[in-house]
Amino acid sequence: FRLKHQTGRVRGRRSSVTMFRASLIALSIGFASANSMHLGKLCRGQTCDNPAFPIMDYAAGENKCVCRAHPCWDDNGAAHSCVGEDAPFLTFSYDKDLKLSCGCSSLPFYASTYIVKDLCPGHYCESRDHSVLDYDEAEGKCICRVHPCHDMDGMKHECNDPKFPILRYREDESKPICECAAKMERPVSDEL
């Protein structure tokens, strides 16, 4: 894979370190592909359709759900993107010190910063069968679970349209919903 940075300054040696971190993170979270059931419950009845702010998230300090831009689109002034067909999906994670790592994966990735950064920093799901990082409210701990759309009323949902490759879970007011979303790409204009 190749992680592309866009910034006004020269990245030099830091670029090599960033690339190394990105490759490690892409390997460690390469199987993740969806958002959590905990977030679906918190943000019931809401969705994010604006391509500039495609990630459903929870702002704990404001006690409300929000639509966010991908955190790697503004990583301390660097705008990351993934080029190439072998790993075209931009991923992110946070370590225990809340340091953002961006990488590229061959599998679609959709996660919430509330889960990945606020509740479960330093946690990664490496199993293809239990690829979704989530928070178990009853147990008060982070878990890796099966994608909720892989067994929704006995049906395994998939996204086979290359224009909408991300399998996304959310909850409506009365039922869970599995839907296919577009690949997250940073808008070209300064709408962020």
Image (tube, rainbow, N blue to C red):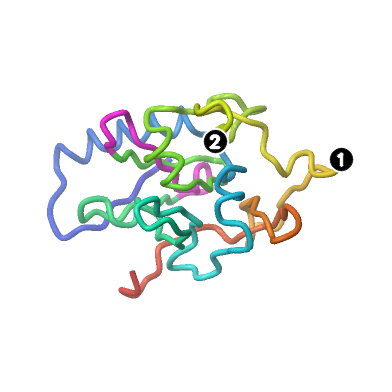
- Looking at the rendered structure, which numbered label has been put on residue 79? none
- Looking at the rendered structure, which numbered label has been put on residue 154? 1
Residue under pointer 2: 134
- Name which residue lies at 37% across and 40% down: 117
The residue closer to the viewer here, 154 or 70, is: 154
Q: Is residue 89 magenta?
A: yes
Q: Picture coordinates of residue 163 (x, y %)?
A: 63, 62
Q: Picture coordinates of residue 114 (x, y %)?
A: 42, 45
Amino acid carrying label 1: it is Gly
Q: Which segment did they paint magenta?
A: 84-99
Q: Are marks 1 and 2 in contact (CB under 8 Å)?
A: no
Instruction: Check the picture and name the quadrant holding the N terminus.
Output: top left
Within 10 Å of the Cα at label 2, are there few (<14), some (14-19), or many (20+) other Cα atoms? many
Q: Is residue 34 above or below residue 190?
A: above
Q: Which SS type dominates the magenta stretch?
A: loop
Looking at the image, the residue that sits furthest to the right is 154
- Name which residue lies at 58% across and 61% down: 182
Q: Is residue 98 magenta?
A: yes
Q: Picture coordinates of residue 155 (x, y %)?
A: 84, 43
